[in-house]
Amino acid sequence: MRRPFVISALLIASASIVPTAIAAPDAPSSILTSPDAKDVLSYARPEIARVTHVDLDLTADFKAHVMRGIATLDILARPGAREIVLDDKDLVISRITDARGRPLKWSVGTSDDYKGAPLTVQIGAARRIVITYRSDPKARALGWLAPALTAGKTKPYLYSQGESINNRSWIPTQDSPGIRQSWTARITVPSDLVATMSAERLTPRGIPGPRGWHSYRFRMDHNVPPYLIALAVGDLRFKAIDARSGIYSEPSVLAKDAAELSDTGKMVTAAESLYGKYRWGRYDVLVLPPSFPFGGMENPTLTFATPTIITGDKSNVDVIAHELAHSWSGNLVTNATWSDSWLNEGFTTYFENRIDEALYGKERAATLADLSWDDLQRDLKAAPDAKATRLHGDPEGVYGELDYTKGSTFLRTIEYTVGRARWDAYLRSYFDRHAFQPQTTAGFLADLRANLIKGDQALEAKLQLDQWAYGTGLPDNAVHVRSATLAKIDQTLASIAAGAPIGSIDASHWSTQEWLRFLNGLPRKQSAQRLAELDRSLGLSASNNAYIRSAWLVLAIGNRYDPAIPSIAQFLPSVGRGLLILPVYAALKAQGDWGMPIARKVYATARPGYHPTIDAAIDKMLGAKP
């Protein structure tokens, strides 16, 4: 493999955002220029000119649903470079100048529905540019929520979701994971709301501004992939867990959320004991309103989390372990392109399981790993073609959750082959060697061969590295961890299949994982009488656990079970997490003349509360017009 070309030069210091002296941002991270590091989802040409620092001065306009203001970009360019290419998704740009206010020529190229358009700025000798702009009201990254869609029901809410290429809809920069950037921000919001971001919070109480407004300032000195710049504005309060971790949430649910996530600080300590120092300062969690489209998002210093993980029994806090693990895999060492998302999610899923084992024991970790194996088998069977099962492949082209499940199984197989102590020592050193840098699959394999295998041909053959990374399907050396807890659920399923009454099941102490094994393990064809017995005995249609409710509704819909329709109509508008609602919509679609009218009717009500990325997915699925 060609060695990466590292651009080295002095970074022009960004303007201070506070009156006191602050530490300088990190020196620019390396840019990988090997062919496999070319990001086809970005228009940027970082080998010519790249963004190294972003400074935002924006106002959240809740009436117009836009962010408006100024982005100042620091640029590092090779000698003779006269232009820089940024990524733009429907930004409304007023003007672009150099640091002294002199106008610069700029143009927006042909737009692609998904990728957006290239924004080319003629920089000449300028190495700092100032862009005055606003976002579009339908910006793909931004979720604007009416008060009725929040827990408190009295104040509006705004949050962003940048991964993978959404931030170009509200920040004019080079929106590629391989182009790491430091950043600062001043965010002005209505005075009855609080702003927080994925960075050091310099003014947690805000700074008074014009009547009815106040501002918050933020600073991220480390270079991060731009999809990790994240914002939330709402009626927020904070509760500390320990000296470096705490929970942000709306006042009415803060106590409940903090109690559920009280192990967050212990998770940070457990993670550090495995793979080295946590390098981001604080680790806080923001629990968002239900429309948040993911289980969690690993924004540095401030994980964004769905309220669906708050189930009262801590059985779903593995989501927080997952997002915390991203502080090493993904945030610290980042996939250079989205063709290698498994370097982000596969590593993190493996690491998450190790955190769970450290805190909750081997059997809890085995239960989660065994369920992950089920998901792996499901996606391998459902993938539309073989190439969709490769870890390294088309950008965003891995089917389902295979970048998570196949990726983590790959790493677990290495662990079982070389031994845990040797594997942990390697992985810890890997994070240290590549900290704050982009990475490719080829780069990881080269590092693995140089620092773990070290020429051992027998070990090389046993691991089947290239088959795992570039091949289709599942290699024959894959390790399947089996759970005794889930084996008991399998016994229950067998007894039910043999005719035992549903009322004989004692599910009072089941975890979410046990419920999912049971519901997903039931035969897909059920009589109306049996479905009624399940619902009556187990209270499935009224379950407050969104994981259970989703799995039950998929089963009920597959059998056109009319009594479940009211539960469908209540559930889908109340949850925005794609993992839980997309399967329900897909099940409705599969039922054609019975399911599609239900799906369209419910979606018409639910759509205003979903994030734009979820809207787009369901619009496509149902053939709905936005």
Image (spheres, rainbow, N blue to C red):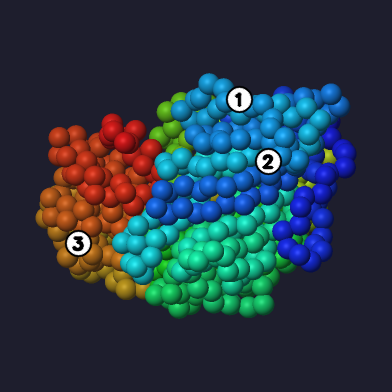
Q: Give the label, 2 or 3, closer to the camera.
A: 2
Residue drawn at 23 percent across, 64 percent down: 542
Rounded to the nearest angstrom, the CA distance separating label 2 from label 3 is 59 Å
Residue in the foreground of this view, choosing between 445 and 501: 445
Residue drawn at 73 percent across, 46 percent down: 53
Label pair 1/3, CB-CB below 8 angstroms: no
Quadrant of the image containing the C terminus: top left
Q: Quick check: 287 left or right of 118? A: left
Q: Is residue 414 visible?
A: no
Q: Is 68 situated above or below 484?
A: above
The image quadrant of residue 362 is bottom right
Residue in the foreground of this view, choosing between 71 and 618: 71
Q: Amino acid type of disc 1? A: Ser
| Local secondary structure at mark 3 | helix
Residue 44 numbered mark, or none:
none
Upstream in sequence: badge 2 or badge 3: 2
Provide the residue designation for mark 3: 535
Where residue 101 appears, as percent x and y from the top left, is: 71, 39
Residue in the foreground of this view, choosing between 72 and 459: 72
Q: Is 4 situated above or below 197?
A: above
The image quadrant of residue 103 is top right
Residue drawn at 24 percent across, 49 percent down: 605
Rounded to the nearest angstrom, the CA distance separating label 1 from label 3 is 59 Å
Where residue 420 appears, as percent x and y from the top left, is: 71, 57
Where residue 2 appears, as percent x and y from the top left, is: 82, 27
Provide the residue designation for mark 2: 130
Q: Amino acid type of disc 3? A: Asp
Rounded to the nearest angstrom, the CA distance separating label 1 from label 2 is 15 Å
Q: Amino acid type of disc 2? A: Val
Residue furthest top in the image: 110
